[in-house]
Image (cartoon, rainbow, N blue to C red):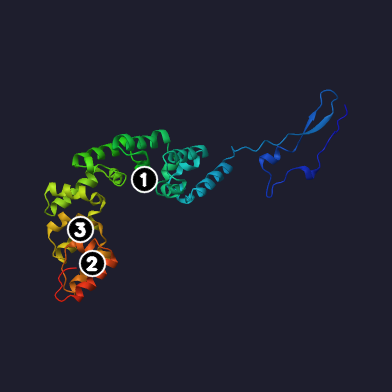
Amino acid sequence: MIIRFMHVLPQASIPQSPQHPTKTHLKTLQKPSINPKNGVLTATTDPPPPLTTTDSGLLFRKKILYLKSLKVNPTKALQKNPNFRSTSLQTLKSVENCLSSMGIERSQFGRIFDMYPQLLTSDPHTDLYPVFDFLLADVGLQFYDVRKSIIRCPRLLICSVEDQLKPTLWFLKKLGFVGPNRITSQTTTLLVSNVRTTLMPKLDYLMGLGFEYEQVVNMVLRSPGLLTFSIENNFKPKFDYFLNEMKGDLGDLKRFPQYFSYSLEGKIVPRHRLLVDHGLNVPVWEMLMVSDGEFTARLIEARLKLGGKRL
């Protein structure tokens, strides 16, 4: 038997890696085999495997590029949602398609996913669509208002409908958020608050200031934002200033609960001190409701009037 090579690939035709051969490169090397017809040993070359997207490194890079296209910080997303590594690109895009179907623009995704990276790997059918159904059916929002609610409060998307959203909606309706005071796209942010640990303590605090329950209810219905304010960082310092520095009356807060929505250092204190310096005394709503320009104009006008006591 004569054993010889019938064909040998030149060395230059063997794919080379810049650093070291990979498994793909090794598969392209010649493998000798014996032809059963003539007994000749022939060098053969297996064709390189087709390039597919099953390569984990390539898939991961595609997912990173996808996040960047949405203006999402990949590092933050990976830190807060490790499941991102094992999630397919198709799953990520299904979340985008779900949000888009509710009218949410792609330009909003970066902010939403940066705030709550866990949404990237959520299941639209079990996690997201139930929230949309709740806002439409239970809260009674119009379709175009669902988008407004999500943009204003993305946290809605990570809340359990049964454990969080429905119990809070029931509580708010019992409190009086029905009819003309019903929950709207501007007040759906209240739905993410826990009744026992967040909403009730704020109502109790306001009643502790000397208000009756009915008075507190009327205050929060007129100014729902009161239920979103921090007791320690908002209510306490502003009430202390109102009571001790402004010598205010509780009746003024009943008539103008929006007082708590104004910045203490940015508006309340500066305007009050200007009034004190000029010997003027006005109701709290007149002091705060006007723009800076109008407040200054009224202050100058009052100074020009002899004995002016009001803006």
In the image: residue 41, left or right of residue 73: right
- Nearer-the-camera pick, 299 or 45: 299
Q: Earlier in the sequence, mark 1 or mark 2?
A: 1
In front: label 1 or label 2:
1
Residue beneath the point at 19% across and 42% down: 175
Instruction: Tell which of 305 and 15 is nearer to you.
Output: 305
Quadrant containing the C terminus is: bottom left
Q: Which mark is residue 186?
A: none
**Disc 1 and disc 3: Cα gap in Å?**
31 Å
Question: Which residue position holds label 2?
Answer: 269
- Mark seen at residue 148: 1
Tell me if I can see residue 178 in this picture.
no
- Residue at x 18% of width, y 59% of height: 239
Q: Amino acid at mark 2?
A: Val
* Disc 3 from disc 2: Cα separation: 15 Å
Callout 1: helix, strand or loop? helix
- Between marks 3 and 2 in the image, the one whose residue lies nearer the viewer: 2
Whole-percent x, y for residue 179 in the image: 22, 40
Q: Estimate the x, y position of residue 1 in percent, counting from the top left.
A: 87, 26
Residue 60: x %, y % from top left: 54, 43
Q: Label 1 to label 2, Cα distance in Å?
A: 33 Å
- Against 308, residue 60 (above or below) is above
- For disc 3, the marked residue is 236
Going from the N terminus, do you reach mark 1 or mark 3 first? 1
Residue 105 left/right relative to 298: right
Q: Specify the farthest residue to the right.
A: 2
- Image x and y of residue 212, in percent: 11, 49
Q: Are marks 1 and 3 in contact (CB under 8 Å)?
A: no
User: Is there a contact, CB below 8 Å, between mark 1 and mark 2?
Assistant: no
Residue type at tag 1: Lys
